[in-house]
Every structure is written in structure tokens, then in C-alpha cells.
Amino acid sequence: MTPLIEYDDASPEVRAVYDDIMATRKTDYINNLWKVIAHHPPTLQRTWERVKTMMGASGVLDPVTREMIYIAVSVTNNCEYCIATHTASARAKGMTDEMFGELMAIIGLANETNRLANGYRVQVDERYR
Amino acid sequence: MTPLIEYDDASPEVRAVYDDIMATRKTDYINNLWKVIAHHPPTLQRTWERVKTMMGASGVLDPVTREMIYIAVSVTNNCEYCIATHTASARAKGMTDEMFGELMAIIGLANETNRLANGYRVQVDERYR
Amino acid sequence: MTPLIEYDDASPEVRAVYDDIMATRKTDYINNLWKVIAHHPPTLQRTWERVKTMMGASGVLDPVTREMIYIAVSVTNNCEYCIATHTASARAKGMTDEMFGELMAIIGLANETNRLANGYRVQVDERYR
Amino acid sequence: MTPLIEYDDASPEVRAVYDDIMATRKTDYINNLWKVIAHHPPTLQRTWERVKTMMGASGVLDPVTREMIYIAVSVTNNCEYCIATHTASARAKGMTDEMFGELMAIIGLANETNRLANGYRVQVDERYR
Amino acid sequence: MTPLIEYDDASPEVRAVYDDIMATRKTDYINNLWKVIAHHPPTLQRTWERVKTMMGASGVLDPVTREMIYIAVSVTNNCEYCIATHTASARAKGMTDEMFGELMAIIGLANETNRLANGYRVQVDERYR
Amino acid sequence: MTPLIEYDDASPEVRAVYDDIMATRKTDYINNLWKVIAHHPPTLQRTWERVKTMMGASGVLDPVTREMIYIAVSVTNNCEYCIATHTASARAKGMTDEMFGELMAIIGLANETNRLANGYRVQVDERYR
């Protein structure tokens, strides 16, 4: 495991990102992901900038839908860290047990039918090209 | 490519599924996927039964959200057939260009951060276990 | 697409592999894969050596089972070339339509349940560790 | 980790599935997967129904072959839970060490050659289209 | 396929990115990828900004190594578009046939051994944790 | 987890590979991967032979570049064992923190752009076919 860079040991540029994370999320907790990618400050900055913009409230998709899309990708890729943290985020933003159950069922279905389409080598219908 | 089984050449059990697809979707068009997996009728029946139930209107998630979740999986797995057909379905159910743009951006972001979490071997935070 | 190296244009070391492929398979046809990886002779030699040994008749698994395992991987990874050629090989070695239908159904099921296990973060049972 | 729903805490519809699993498998043990997806009863029911049908003894493929196909997918997707449990099932149904060794070798080979075909962008031979 | 947004039809913000691409790369050619993601200008801007920074000449890794890493990911994911374009970029920056051959061989090897490690469920050695 | 086959319990053919690993790497330590795949000696022999040849110093790519390519694949596939051991190898061969940071950033970028290309269904430019 990559060691965590705690706030007190962080450089000023890393601290600035940590401060922005805490201010944006109204919390004093920094997830391990940020404390780890802080080993490469440009990655920390670029990733946070994009997560802040894309997973936030602005835009046309609502925050819970964004989290569910994120979970669909993470489950398909089997990223345990991402599944654990974004399931928590989604629940915090309003995802119910029933919504999670349907989300998982659709993820499972799509992963299955993707392989039926591949394995049978189905040609895209003229009208969907 | 697996040859298509057209309605006129289909067995009664396959025709019954085709009829249900057309009645449910209020169309006389059957997608190539169904005409191909019709080579194995139990797969046709089980798959249609589940798609009908899970991608329809009942349940707590709205139809457009279901389609976007389906697309997120299909893009991550790179199933061209599934991307083409479900993007069309999502648009038919109300997905706008702006929604599609945000969907794609989140899919891209998650696919990236999944690898940052894996590659840096980030440990799941105590609170998210 | 990478251009094909035809027999007449091949170096002696590449021709030796082509000769062995044709002798082993009792055919005068060389698949495109071999004609392409012939651009890097060590890869051609090592890959053919292993395919010859592992996909042949010796060992405890029968040749059709070997092909079906190969197809299961290729469908999951969505390698169109590998699906097309190994489905043809499997059929040549005795895979029937019914066997292919069951194979595809199991591939689909496993791809689905893999995601249910991941997404729900199911812990491995004590007895299976 | 998602908490397990034990038999005594389960709803009648969930218990009915648990009873069927135990009766079908002639055991009093329920795997963690079922106890977890029991959080969404429709997923529990549909998944069990399909596993029961597809991984059982009926059909043209023998039970060990079915398990090996399932393992091939699970290893390719890196689903630890599925690898652990289905390797145990396969062994219980007759998979020997030698069969497992060959299975793993073919899975490895296919995962390699899938990438050679992709990376060299090999065109599907006319005869396999 | 998503239609291309040509320079003459592009909005000023999209044109600004196109101009920067052409100036940075000293070419008057814009790849299809950019003309397609131009449908969502924030994605176009953010993606170009990052590609420009990360695939360029600054930093500690040389440009050819960067392209080969990019190819390794794209081949593993089977993104045909990315394989085609980045193989061309890598060659333009100095990748020889021999380098490409070794690159592909290592990609194949890693995809194989990844599955051996997964399938045999190898525990990480104490010293590498 | 598959049990380890220690040197003292190994058959002569397995010991011969262990001896070659230790001699080649100038160490008395054998990684768990080898001790596990030793359960199937032909896999042990073939895999070691290829790793020895391909990850060594001969050829046109330098050893650190080889390891970074290997890591790019392993991170994309999320093989924890392979990430842990090959990150250690890469560092032992000279990969610095800064190099690792750039490597991870490129892996993340490629995983993202692969999905943008797939999801938008971008057609390969005429000139890159």
C-alpha cells in the first residue's frame, strides 16, 4: 500500500487541495485516495479539479445519478476502493436500498448482454449506425 | 456474423418472444440482437424477460437513468452493439446532448480514477469498509 | 491493419513456423494472426509453440473443451478475431449449436454474477479461502 | 462489506429461495453471495433460478465443463469471490489438479493472444466472417 | 458513429482548441477524436489540456515511452481507435518495428501472468505489501 | 489461496526452475507466484522462460521501460499481485517517484480516453487505418 500523506506532512500545494476538498465537502475528513495521489501533486490537482466539477451539483444530471454512473463503471472494472467510497457518497446523496438494488441488477444485466452481443457477433442494425 | 432468424423462419416459441417484444415496445421492428440469440431459445426467453422487466418503467429508477447506467457498463466493456442501440434508446426516452456529454465525461473520469486507486494500491478507509 | 507476411515473402525462420502450422493442422491455410505476428519472429515462434501444445489433443482436457474455455475468455475480453476463429475451430472439433448456446449462456451468467459479487462486496466464505 | 441476511432474519420470499438452494444442493450451507444479494429479493430469485438451471446437470455440457467455463470468465474479470467458490464447486464435481492446471494455462494463453490480435489489429480472415 | 464537427462549423470555443492542437502539433490535421468530443466542449477542453501536458515532451519520461504506455493500456482495453492513432504517434516519435514487437510481447505476457496470479489466488509476498 | 510449494518440498523439475530464478536474479528469494504455479510444472517452466527472456536486459527496450509497460497492463486489469511485485521491480531497476507519478497519470488518461473513443464511437481516421 502506498503510505498516506497527512495534512501536517503535506507541502503547501498539497495542503491547498486538501483545504479545498474540506471546504467544498464541508467536512474535515480527507479520503485515502487523495492522501495517496498527493505523492504526485499534478495528479492530485487535476483529479480533484475534475471530480469537484463533474461529481458536484452543477450540470444537467443530478448528483445521485452521477454517483450511480460512477458506481456502474467501478463495479464493471472491479475497483473495490471506488465501489466502497462512491456507494457511501451515493447513499449520502439520497440513494435508497431499492435504488441500489436496481442499479446492481442493471449493471449485472448489461455485463451479461454485452457478452451475448460480442459472442454471437451481432451486427449493428442499419438504423443504429 | 451469426445469421439473423427472421420472423417468418422462426419457431413458434421464438415467434412468441418476437410478438411480445413488438407489443411491449409498440413497434414492428425487432433488433438484430434478438434475431441472433434466437438461435438458443432459452437464452432469448430469459434475456428478453429480464430486459423487459429491468429496462422498463416500473421500479424506482426512471427509464433514462436505467439506460445511462446500461451505457456506462457498455462503454467500459466496449460493446459497440450495446452502445449503439442503448444510446438510441436513451435518446428516445429523453436523454439530451448535454446529458450524454456529462454521462460520457463521468464514465471517462471513473475509468481513470479506478486505475489511480488500483495502481497506487489505496486502502479502503476504515469508515467505508 | 498490419499487413500480412505471405509465405513467399517470409524469411526462413518464419517459413519454418508456417510449415509446422500447416503440417500440424493438415491444411495449406495459414490464419491471418500468424501472418501478422510474423513481423516479430520470436513472438510468432513462442506463440505457435504454446498454441500447438495447449490447444492440441494431448493432456487431460478434450480439444472441444479447450476451445470453449478459449472462447469464454475471448468473449469476455471482446476480441472479435479470436471469437471468430476459435468458434470456427470449436465447431470443426465437434461443438454443436446446442453446446454453443449453453456456452454463451454460461459466459453471460458469469459476467453478470461476477459484478453482483463485486458490487455487493461479498466476502469470501471462510470455507473457500 | 454488505452484511449477510441469515435465515432466521430473512423474509418468507427470501427463505423460500434459501430452502430451494439447500434442497437442490443437498446441503445446509448457504454461500455468502446469496445472503448478500438477498437485500434485493428480485435479484436473489432471478439469479438463483438461472444458476440452478444453467450450472446444474441438465443440458449438453457436463457439470465440470460448465464450472470451468465459469472460472475462465471469473479469472479474466478477476472476481475473487467467484474464483474461490467456483474452483471449489469444480473440484467437488470432479476437476483434478491436472485439469485445473490446463484450465489456467489456456486462460492465460487466450488472454495473451487476445491482445496480440488486438494490438496488431489483425483482420478477420474472409473464411471466418 | 457520431458526426464530426469540422472547423468551419465549430463554435469559437471549439475553434480555439482546434487552433491550439494544430499549433502545438505543427500540423493542419485534427484527428477524428477531437472533432467528435467537440460535441461537449468542456470534455474537449479538459481532454486536450491533459493530453497536451501529459503526452508532450516535458517531464521525466521520454515521448516514445509515454506513447508505449498509452498503447499498453489501449491494447489491454481493446480500443481500436486509440491503438491505431497512438501506434502512429509512437512511430512518428521514433518507435521502431523491433520496439513495437517487444512492446506487444510484454503486453501479451502481462495479460497472461495477470490471470495466473488471479486464478491461482496468489497472496502478495510480505515484502511487497 | 493456493498453498506455496517450498524448495524443500519441490520435485526435481520444479527445483531446477527455482535454481534458475535464483541464479538469474542473484537472490535466494523466490516470489510467491512461482511457488504457486509450481503446482503445474509446465506452466512454471513456460512462464519463467518467457519472463526471463522478455523482462531481462536483452532487446531494444530498457528494463525500466519494460517494467512500466508491465505495470500499465496490470493496473488496467487490476491485478494486485502483479502491481505490487512489478512496482517493486521497477523501483529496483531505477524507476523514481516522479517516473511512477507520470506513469500512473498516463495510465489514467489512456483509460479515460479509451472510453471517450468507444462511447462516442469515433471512426478511425482514413490515414491511420
Image (cartoon, coloured by chain):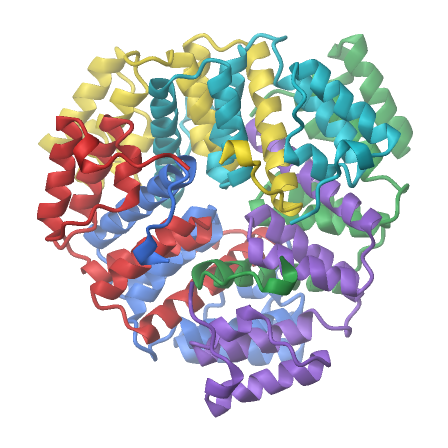
Chain colours: A yellow, B cyan, C purple, D green, E red, F blue
Q: Nearer the viewer, residue F92 or E95?
A: E95
Left or right: F57 in relation to B62: left
| Count of numbered tags | 0
Q: Position of residue D83 (x, y in %)?
A: 65, 45
| Residue A125 at x, y percent in the picture | 57, 36
In the image: residue C16, left or right of residue A70: right
Q: Is residue B54 left or right of residue B82?
A: right
Position of residue F91 in the picture relative to residue F37 (left or right): left
Residue located 70% across and 79% down the image:
C27
Q: Residue E101 falls in which quadrant of the image? A: bottom left
Nearer to me, D100 or B44: B44
Residue C34 vertical placement versus C61 (above, below)? below
The single residue placed furthest to the front in the displayed view is B8
Residue located at (71% from left, 36% from top): B35
Residue D19 vertical position relative to residue F53 in the rendered view, above or below: above
Q: Residue at x 64, y 61 (%)?
A: D128
Which residue reaches farthest bottom?
C12
Residue D29 locus on image (x, y percent): 81, 30
In this view of the protein, can residue A9 be seen by the observer? no
Q: On the rendered image, what quadrant is the N terminus of chain A found in?
A: top left
The foreground one among A31 and C72 is: C72
Residue F38 x/y as whole percent: 62, 68
Whether residue C37 can be seen here: yes
Residue for point 51% across, 40% down: B80
